[in-house]
Structures are given as structure tokens and as C-alpha cells.
Amino acid sequence: MAKKHDQAGRVVAKKLGGQYDPTASPDVKGKQGRAEVKTMASEIPKAKQQLGTRPGKAYVVLPKPEHGKARDRLRGSGVGLMNYKGEITKRSGTGRKKT
């Protein structure tokens, strides 16, 4: 894996209280959620598949320049978005509005 990918995976694993394993899907499994690290927003469909449908928080981790496109692709999915520093820029949730 690329150096930045591995760095981001380790940072996010620490934030989610878990482990980073680039050979497993998802890349990060933690007490506070799971995450898949990618480099481009076009990889979101694969990332969502790798995250699966288990209950709990799920995030796609992308570099900041990809977040504009990523937000549109994640809208309504319940999958959150993090940058490579582990900062949440879109919360994970059901994607539904409360009534």
C-alpha cells in the first residue's frame, strides 16, 4: 500500500479505537466504527461494498481535495466521511431526517 494510505489508516484506527489491516476489508475495525481508506471519490462504490451493512458507524477516508465529490456520492447512504487526519467531515448515520 502507499505510504499516505497506511498513515491515514493508522491515524483513523487510533481515532476509532481499533486496528488497521490493509489486507482485510474494511481497512479499519474499531470499537467506535469501521473505515475504508481510499484515494479517490470514484472508489466510493467499492468502499461501501467493503464496509458492508453491519450496524454501527462506517466511514470512507479520503484526502481533502476529494471531499466535494465524495459528499455527493455519500448523500443519503448513512456512510460518513473522514479526511486523512482522522477528522470527521460528514457524520455516519442513517441518512434519514428525523420526523
Image (cartoon, rainbow, N blue to C red):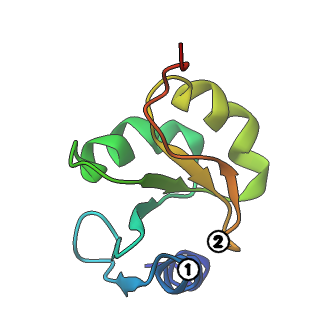
Taking the spot 49% from the left edge, 27% from the top edge, the residue there is: 95
- Label 1: which secondary element: helix
Q: Residue at the top extreme? A: 99
Q: How many marks?
A: 2
Q: Pointer 1: residues within 10 angstroms few (<14), some, or many (20+)?
A: some
Question: In the image, which disc is placed on residue 15?
Answer: 1
Q: The N terminus appears in which quarter of the rendering? A: bottom left
Q: Quadrant of residue 21?
A: bottom left
Q: Residue at label 2?
A: 86
Question: In the image, which disc is placed on residue 30?
Answer: none
Q: Position of residue 56 (x, y in %)?
A: 33, 53
Q: Quadrant of residue 35?
A: bottom left
* Residue 24 against residue 78 in the figure, above or below: below
Query: Gap between marks 2 and 1, in whole Å?
Result: 7 Å
Please give left or right for residue 58 compared with residue 88 in the image: left
Taking the spot 54% from the left edge, 20% from the top edge, the residue there is: 98
Taking the spot 42% from the left edge, 70% from the top edge, the residue there is: 32
* Residue 23 against residue 62 in the figure, above or below: below
Taking the spot 35% from the left edge, 76% from the top edge, the residue there is: 30
Q: Position of residue 60 (x, y in %)?
A: 50, 52
Q: Quadrant of residue 36?
A: bottom left
In contact (CB < 8 Å): disc 2 and disc 1: yes
Q: Position of residue 48 (x, y in %)?
A: 35, 42
The amino acid at mark 1 is Lys
Q: Pointer 2: residues within 10 angstroms few (<14), some, or many (20+)?
A: some
- Label 2: which secondary element: loop
- Mark 2 vs 1, N-terminal side: 1
The amino acid at mark 2 is Gly
Circle 2 or circle 1, nearest the eye: 1
In depth, the one of 93 and 45 nearer the eye is 93
